Amino acid sequence: VQLQASGGGLVQPGGSLRLSCTAPGRTFRRTTWFRQAPGKEREFAASIKWSGGFTYYADSVKGRFTVSRDNAKSTVYLQMNILRPEDTAVYYCAADAQSYFSSSWSNYDYWGQGTEVTVSS
């Protein structure tokens, strides 16, 4: 199963972007956004449980990013506001059938192809 991630682009500092992650016809118990900046390891950004909509955020994005889901569209969104140059990275969505929260990328079975976000003036 390949997830489809989209919505990346170039934005000025302080701007906003909304990323989407979809897997048509599939349902999962959790979907998580990771990001990988050039020369750095992949890191956790935000996660959502499909049942109940519980959300989790890395400290670096808390208060600026919001993760949400649309059950009918099998889509998870990452609304990113007040973007900073340090948010520049390739953003990946990952999902699987486990219901517990995990910030470790190795615990996920299904991945999107990544969408690039560049924050620069």
Image (cartoon, helix red, strand yellow):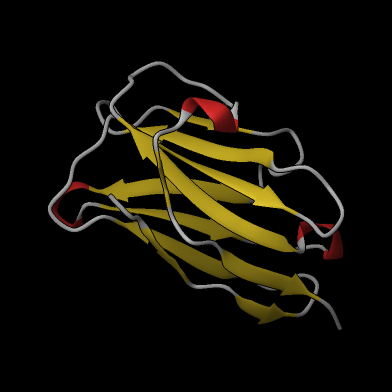
User: In the rendered image, which quarter is residue 43 located in?
Assistant: top right
Eyeballing the image, is 69 above or below 32? below
Instruction: Pinpoint residue 23: horizontal percent, then vertical percent.
Output: 26, 55
From the viewer's perspective, tell me whether residue 70 is left or right of residue 103.
left
Residue 71 or residue 98, whichever sits in front = 98
Residue 110 or residue 75, whichever sits in front = 110
- How many numbered marks appear? 0
Instruction: Pinpoint residue 75: horizontal percent, then vertical percent.
Output: 29, 55
User: In the rendered image, which quarter is residue 116 located in?
Assistant: bottom right
Residue visible at 60% across and 57% down?
A: 91
Residue visible at 57% across and 33% down?
A: 105
Eyeballing the image, is 8 above or below 64? below
From the viewer's perspective, tell me whether residue 9 is left or right of residue 40.
left
Q: Let me know if residue 55 appears in the view.
A: yes
Residue 20 or residue 94, whichever sits in front = 94
- Quarter holding the C terminus? bottom right
Residue visible at 60% across and 50% down?
A: 65
Q: Let me know if residue 82 appears in the view.
A: no
Q: In the image as oriented, which residue stretches furthest toward the top?
A: 100
Instruction: Pinpoint residue 81: horizontal percent, then vertical percent.
Output: 64, 61
From the viewer's perspective, tell me whether residue 101 is left or right of residue 45.
left
Instruction: Pinpoint residue 79: horizontal percent, then vertical percent.
Output: 52, 58
Eyeballing the image, is 106 above or below 32? above
Eyeballing the image, is 69 above or below 102? below
Residue visible at 17% across and 47% down?
A: 26
